[in-house]
Image: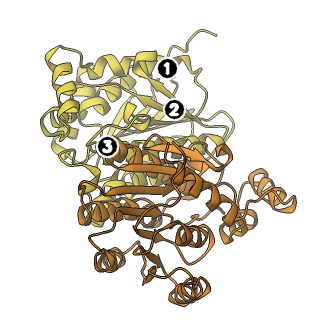
Chain colours: A orange, B yellow
Amino acid sequence: MSPAADLGRVLCIITGASRGFGRAVAQDLYRLVQPGSVLVLAARSGVDLRAFQAELTESEAGRAGLKVEVVVADIGKVEGLENIMRTSREAFCEDMDHIMLINNAASLGDVSKYVKAFTDLAEVDSYLSLNVSSAMCLTAKVLQAFPQRPGLRRSIINVTSLCALQPFRSWGLYCTAKAAREMMFKVLAEEEPDLRVLSYSPGPLDTEMQVEARTKTADPSIKKTFSNMFAQGQLLTCEMSSAKLMKVLLDDKFPSGDHIDVFDV
Amino acid sequence: MSPAADLGRVLCIITGASRGFGRAVAQDLYRLVQPGSVLVLAARSGVDLRAFQAELTESEAGRAGLKVEVVVADIGKVEGLENIMRTSREAFCEDMDHIMLINNAASLGDVSKYVKAFTDLAEVDSYLSLNVSSAMCLTAKVLQAFPQRPGLRRSIINVTSLCALQPFRSWGLYCTAKAAREMMFKVLAEEEPDLRVLSYSPGPLDTEMQVEARTKTADPSIKKTFSNMFAQGQLLTCEMSSAKLMKVLLDDKFPSGDHIDVFDV
């Protein structure tokens, strides 16, 4: 079967959409959906979001019939999740044939210290809430709001990392949360055979998170690895990595629940 | 090298020690440590803990010089962790040569529902706090209270599960937390080469958690698997599984951070 030319008439919800990888994914999706689709972009920064919304809707004059809704929301808060859901329900039309949720929002956590320094329960709780619980609850809310029905495709994308599979010194929180998320989405894939669940690892991206990685990482050798990757131009652009994700989504051949790395596409 | 005859003069902290696997481990360790050792047993139920303490200290009259301290504590609470640490610091003697922490306490989570039903952020947060954050913070506190020094062996045991490696339908929370913990302890093993870190999977045990598993699991086929295992006598006793863990600890050959399953011992 040849890849689809587009992703259908989609309601697509993207968290962390105002910058970095989430923003690149939104830009690509904007070009790959049919008229009648809506992108729901969520992020904490309203200024960035609205500027991005204007850029998307103005720059592509030819793309009539596409809508971009923005939600200024902290996904670590109940109200944040509810705001995303309210906007999504309002944006949904009965003739949409594809619901897509891109669980992209994440934080690196404090990489300036090792696991042995994490004695503060509230700090770890708060990190896991933002990076694990919120993704589980938003996914559950989306699946409940838009239940399975004939002709409706539902895709759940988890933006993951090599850190879900391999331990990295001084990246304790990040590795822990990424491993947790990946297992959670594997369970989901087993439970709901109608879903298309994908954990996509976008690779080392030239983003603000990488600046944090190469400036704050406690472990000298891991820190050096990141600095070298930057210095030697080995970081990927968000656009390049997002393009690979689009290829995977259009091909639509991955086993549901799979981990796919950018370097394997 | 032949296995050691005992585990040394140990300060050993065990969470969830009043019943099930934690209790069996405490019983075994009581026989495998040298005089001057102290077991610090933590659990939520004071009645069970004190009865167990009395049983341990009275039944083995020959084991002079061993102490059992009990801490009634909810490890999901800051005060619970602090109580364990206070008792542990008071119990420590300079001539101890081994610090051992057994992160055993865990809950199954609500297995009567699927991932798509977990829309309540507070419920997921609370589960992850008890089952992930608390293990990270207790481990960090123990490592800080008893830092590396020549002649001091430090062992951190994570009681894990096949669920850390494989998704099980309707066991979303449990799988997620076990995967998270296992990665967290892998990072720790990479960070602190002096530690002996082990994720031990005790197998399907004939415990109260298995009663929950076979009566409450939402997925019919998973539920049936557990019922069949029980009906056909395939569940392991805690004593048998604990004995395998003791063998692994005495042999002391595992790569730090490894996952070892009872069926591989």
Question: At which x and y percent is residue A198?
Answer: 47, 50
Say which amino acid is labelled 3.
Pro
Which residue is labeled 3 in the image?
A193
Dot 1: element: helix
Say which amino acid is labelled 2.
Leu
Pointer 3 local density, CA inside 10 Å: few below 14, some 14–19, many at least 20: few
Question: At which x and y percent is residue B112?
Answer: 17, 46
Say which amino acid is labelled 1.
Val
Left or right placement of residue B211 versus residue B165 in this view: left
Q: Residue B198, which numbered label?
A: 2
Discs 3/2, front: 3
Compare residues B68 and B177 and report the one nearer the observer: B177
Vertical position of residue A232 compared to residue A26: above or below:
above
Count the marks. 3
Dot 3: element: loop
Compare residues A254 and B3 and report the one nearer the observer: A254
- The part of the image, by quadrant, that contains residue B54 is top left
Q: Chain of mark 1?
A: B
Which residue is labeled 1 in the image?
B248
Left or right placement of residue A141 versus residue A55 in this view: left
Q: Chain of mark 2?
A: B
